[in-house]
């Protein structure tokens, strides 16, 4: 695949940066500082890397503003890492497979397939499902009935979208994602468990990304929602009736029980566990491996531990725990001193 | 899909309840208290919701016995949530796809397919496998050789059943489930690791449900078993040679190492970790995120923490940890007081 | 499937053991001590099992050297469990499916398929991909473009290998494995998150095994590597740019963030969480459920807890925590004694 090529000037203008050096150089790939070579652009954020930067073989570097760095060609940007990401979007656009419906795909005649859609081998699209323009459904993905997928989305191989779910535009669902399987709810009867009805749906809004093998369960009654621009890593579990807001980031293997609300702009680490009916208020940050009890309201700020505490408190308590051997020693010594005092007072009397 | 419709009287009789109001009303859907409307039935368990209940637009409500609630139509039941689940089973029966073997499916001539079976697109069924009556095997599921699946089960898309495993009747395997992959066991030799033989099988009994992307490994020697009526959530790992009893509930992302026994009627939270050769006695409840050391015997009761402790003890120790700053302060103050006592005694002498 | 049969003498020679009894007996299966019968071989390592061993119906037993055990036929070996695994490799060789390219498979004409390859139903192999001799690609696996798979590997059903990744020889990828999905990296802009470029690749070396539904992400820039002979359990997450060495063992549901290095011969428990940019030095052992902070260097030895500590220290602190109620009691009593001393001194004055 030949990559698009841009001049340094074009890229500089794209990110609103300031150019130092030859703007007509052609750039066709982003790279890391140490491995980038001719035709490649890299970035640095940190003064510690200036020495490495001056030895980089990259054709162009992106640096912070007012960097004092003697390299032949560079772009100054307020946020070099962001500029690098924006330039990568230009040089490495998402692969747009040529429109095609593979002859092995099984598409219901009652499905509506948009313009310039790619549908790979062994894909199923069920009755009354709607696939938006330019969306790519890769090999082996299974789309049920009454599913809506927006435009410019990519459904990677072996994804399963259960009947009735809605997926927005520019959504990326990585391989093995399952959207709309039954939520986990039962009522105990005399003979065992009866399923609590899991009959409603899932809505995944625009610009969401779900990592490989992540599962989002359908709502019992109502809906499970993943808000616009939210990014979720691999093997995350989202239970029934969760409401995840916009621009939330959730790292790998986190598990979210039923009816949890996470408001906009939260950041959740990996392997976090949520009890049910938790509400995380906008702007909260929850550290990896934290555990949160059911029903808890999590306020803005940084949280850590099992059960979660404000990070400062968590650190303070951890320091106290580390000092426990000393506390015990001090208590022992103090007991001896008290014993000695008692002895002396007794002798006096 | 048109839903079945029942009268309030019929539903009331089905759950052994007591009817107040017009029994001839038609009901065709369950709903939540706040969103249910005409033709829908909702439930309440909690007095706190009586105000909301009296404003509900549901055609019928299920309430506890002797509820003093002025609504046009209601059913009193001993366990309203259970009655609601039983009514949902009637109004929202599991989808029974019309019997069909999709023309793309690859079925071994030596497989035995029961009556009224649904087999979707791109399914494989291997040699000598047996599929029971009315079982549904959805698109992309792969069934190996010598696999036995009972009747009325649903194998969702992209499930994989390895050669030789046995699945009961009325079993639900959600999308991406893997049953019968090799267990994880090696012996270190001079040059690296040799696989400990993983050559035996898995038995999943009747009425079991496994959540999306859950994995149950085959036994090394012997069998891995999931007992009748057990319900397991998404992305749970069940290692080789585990013996999970009947009516056990296991929440998402829990990991169970090899040769663990969990007896009947246990409840296991999410993200719990089991070392190998643990035995959990019938009736034990293990809280989410708990960790259990290998070889441990877990007695009935509620357990929590890493490593697990009885919940009461866990709470007590956690309270002690929270008080650590105060303990330290008290110790400091007491040390000052002892110093003062020593000074005064010294002055006296 | 008829199993190969060997004489006890042949097996004894294969493992360099010492034979006691009739070497001409035919053995065709390994078994466990209590269930093995005629034609089967079992092993014991532990004196505690000698009583059970003497009642075993196995045709042959593998025992430690100089075992005083009166059974008709046994093999003494330095490491009986290893000998058992080596014998299992002979008696239960990995199933070699007859060479075939299933007529439903979609193979790019530009792919290169080696000799004696098995390709199952509904498999895709993309452009310029290369599949080595005797490799088995089972039903529903999807191989992208420019993928390299070595010889004698087994790619189980519904695995997905993204474009450009490299898989070695004698590799086992269990069902649902995803190799090469995008890593998880974003840069926050004014309007939300932009993807940090995830454009590089994954290399999985020879003799690696990945458990069911495990995910290994592609590198942002550079490569993600799993070294030769490394064994990884089910549902493990390996983030972008990780470098996992040779003969590393990683148990189920462990999550490894981006840019983590794990050197050769480490052992990692289940449900461990790694922050990014950690380096685990060769020979370290990390207990299940441990959590490791970003950037940490983990030295050889046994580590435990969140955050990790040397196992001894972890145990010592845990013991201190268990003693907290007593510490509190002692502090209370001591305070009373000091109060009494103060009173008496006050009275004296």
Image (tube, coloured by chain):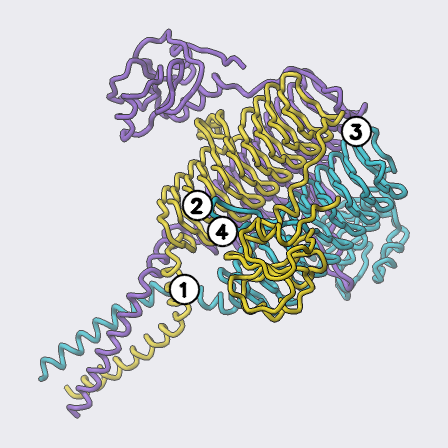
Chain colours: A purple, B cyan, C yellow
Label 4, on which residue?
C269
Seen as rendered, the residue at the extreme bottom is A349
* Residue C169 visible in image: yes
Report the side of B207 relative to A5 (left or right).
right
Q: Residues within 10 Å of mark 4 (few under 14, many from 20)?
A: many
Report the side of C38 relative to C147 (left or right).
right
| Distance from Cα at disc 4 to Cα at disc 1 | 20 Å
Q: Nearer the viewer, residue A277 or B8?
A: A277
Point out the tag, 4 or 1, that comes first from the N-terminus: 4
| Secondary structure under the numbered disc 3 in the rendered image | loop
The answer as to whether the residues below labels 2 and 1 share one chain is yes
* Whether residue A264 is situated above or below residue A76 in the rendered picture: below
Residue beneath the point at 41% across and 64% down: C318
Q: Nearer the viewer, mark 4 or mark 3?
A: 4
Give the image quarter of residue A32.
top left
| Distance from Cα at disc 4 to Cα at disc 3 | 45 Å
Report the side of B50 relative to A18 (left or right).
right
| Distance from Cα at disc 4 to Cα at disc 2 | 13 Å
Q: Residue B317 in the image: state x and y as whole percent.
A: 44, 67
* Residue A168 visible in image: no
Q: Nearer the viewer, mark 2 or mark 3?
A: 2
| Secondary structure under the numbered disc 1 in the rendered image | helix
């Amino acid at each position: 695949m030949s990559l698009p090529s841009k001049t340094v000037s074009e890229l500089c203008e794209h990110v609103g940066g300031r150019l130092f050096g030859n703007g007509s150089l052609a750039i066709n790939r982003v790279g890391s500082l140490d491995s980038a070579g001719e035709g490649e652009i890299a970035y640095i954020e940190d003064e510690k890397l200036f020495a490495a930067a001056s030895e980089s073989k990259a054709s162009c570097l992106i640096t912070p503003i007012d960097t004092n760095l003697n390299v032949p060609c560079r772009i100054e940007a307020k946020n070099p890492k962001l500029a690098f990401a924006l330039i990568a979007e230009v040089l490495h656009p998402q692969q747009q497979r040529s429109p095609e419906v593979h002859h092995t795909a099984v598409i219901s005649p009652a499905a509506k397939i948009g313009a310039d859609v790619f549908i790979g081998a062994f894909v199923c699209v069920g009755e009354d499902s709607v696939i938006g323009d330019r969306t790519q459904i890769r090999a082996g993905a299974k789309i049920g009935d009454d599913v809506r997928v927006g435009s410019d989305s990519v459904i990677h191989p072996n994804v399963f979208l259960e009947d009735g779910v809605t997926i927005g535009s520019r959504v990326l669902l990585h391989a093995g994602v399952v959207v709309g399987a039954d939520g986990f709810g039962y009522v105990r009867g005399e003979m065992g468990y009866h399923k609590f009805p899991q009959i409603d749906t899932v809505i995944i809004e625009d610009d969401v990304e779900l990592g490989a093998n992540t599962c989002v369960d359908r709502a019992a009654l109502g809906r499970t929602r993943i808000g616009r621009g939210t990014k979720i890593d691999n093997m995350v579990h989202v239970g029934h009736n969760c409401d995840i807001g916009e621009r939330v980031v959730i790292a790998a293997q986190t598990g979210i029980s039923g009816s949890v609300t996470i408001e906009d702009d939260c950041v959740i680490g990996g392997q976090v566990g949520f009890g049910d009916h938790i509400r995380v208020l906008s702007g909260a940050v929850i550290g990896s491996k934290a555990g949160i009890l059911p029903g808890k309201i999590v306020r803005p700020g940084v949280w850590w531990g099992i059960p979660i505490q404000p990070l400062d408190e968590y650190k303070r308590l951890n320091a106290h725990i580390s000092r426990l051997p000393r506390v015990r020693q001090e208590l022992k010594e103090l007991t001896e001193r008290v014993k000695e005092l008692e002895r002396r007072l007794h002798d006096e009397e």
